[in-house]
Image (cartoon, rainbow, N blue to C red):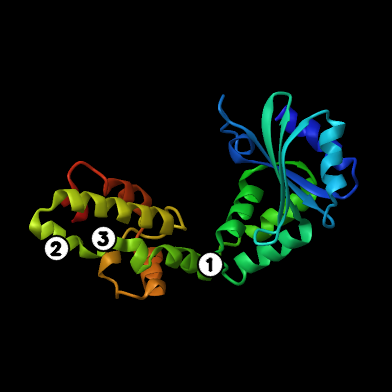
Amino acid sequence: MEVAKALTRHYVDNGNVAAVVVAGSVGRGRADAHSDLELDVYWHRPPTDEERLAPIRAAGDQVRQFWAYEPVDAEWSEELTADGVEVTVSGFTASWLEACIEQVTVDGDADVTKQMRLSVINEGTGVHGQDLIERWRLRSTRYLRNLAVAVAASYLTAEQLGAWRQWRALYARGDLLALRAACGQAAHVILGGSVRGERGADRAPVVQVADSPAGAPDHLAAVLLDQIDGCAGRGCDLQCPRPREAAR
């Protein structure tokens, strides 16, 4: 974290930086000896190459990779080594994040990149622009139902469910190898789709997801969110040594 703070001071000297957040395991307080450092820098206006390089040079650090702006992710990115620590810097404009928060929490946009940025804002460690970061956190914690359904539905497709849709046939035939693989697929879907964590009432078995109408991911998502709680833990149970019991 000290490396992050030292590097941040050089970014702040630029005058074009609105906020800096430490992401990844370091920002979440779960770093170990193998962790690198991930730094999200939010610019007031799109940075020039010189504005991106100046803080790194001022810190006496070494640039390893320097990428041009990526319009798909709205990101500037560079990799460097600071005091022997590998650092990845991801840059965005503050206005882009403002729009991102609106799109995710109001419009129900399930885009993975936008979800990741909101996760960093809420779980990372702010090292500059704390008031702005707190405002972003207050806005981005409004995890509305339409967003929950959109995220769950992105997992509950025929392609994602795969062989799980044939679990009854596999069960009846005693094809335990294929059933175990299908259970693994189901666990992935359930863990990914359980966007509300452990909320709601525990009212229905996991298998009800597979009983919902095929080709209706929004309906499946509603079933998952309204009728299945504790599904993350039970999703892991699907990979137990006895797949017949797990499927039931």
**For the view shown, which residue lies furthest in the left direction?**
173
Numbered badge on residue 147: 1
Nearest to N terminus: mark 3 or mark 2? 3
Where is residue 179 shown, x and y percent of the image?
19, 53
The amino acid type found where label 2 is placed reads Ala
Q: On the rendered structure, is 33 left or right of 127?
A: left
- Asked whether disc 1 touches disc 2, contact meaning CB atoms under 8 Å apart, the reply is no
1 or 2: mark nearer the eye: 2
Q: CA distance from mark 1 to mark 3?
A: 25 Å
The amino acid type found where label 1 is placed reads Leu
Question: On the rendered image, what quadrant is the N terminus found in?
Answer: top right
Where is residue 85 shown, x and y percent of the image?
68, 27
Q: CA distance from mark 3 to mark 2?
A: 10 Å
The amino acid type found where label 3 is placed reads Trp
Numbered badge on residue 178: none
Q: Residue drawn at (56%, 33%), measured in percent from left and top?
A: 30
Q: Residue drawn at (70%, 59%), measured in percent from left and top?
A: 74
Depth order, front residue of 99/158: 158
Numbered badge on residue 164: 3
Q: CA distance from mark 1 to mark 2?
A: 34 Å
Q: Secondary structure at mark 3?
A: helix
Q: Residue drawn at (24%, 43%), measured in percent from left and top?
A: 240
Q: Is residue 225 above or below residue 87?
A: below
State which quadrant residue 73 falls in: bottom right
Q: Secondary structure at mark 2?
A: helix
Q: Secondary structure at mark 1?
A: helix
Which residue has dot 2 on it?
169
Where is residue 111 shown, x and y percent of the image?
56, 63
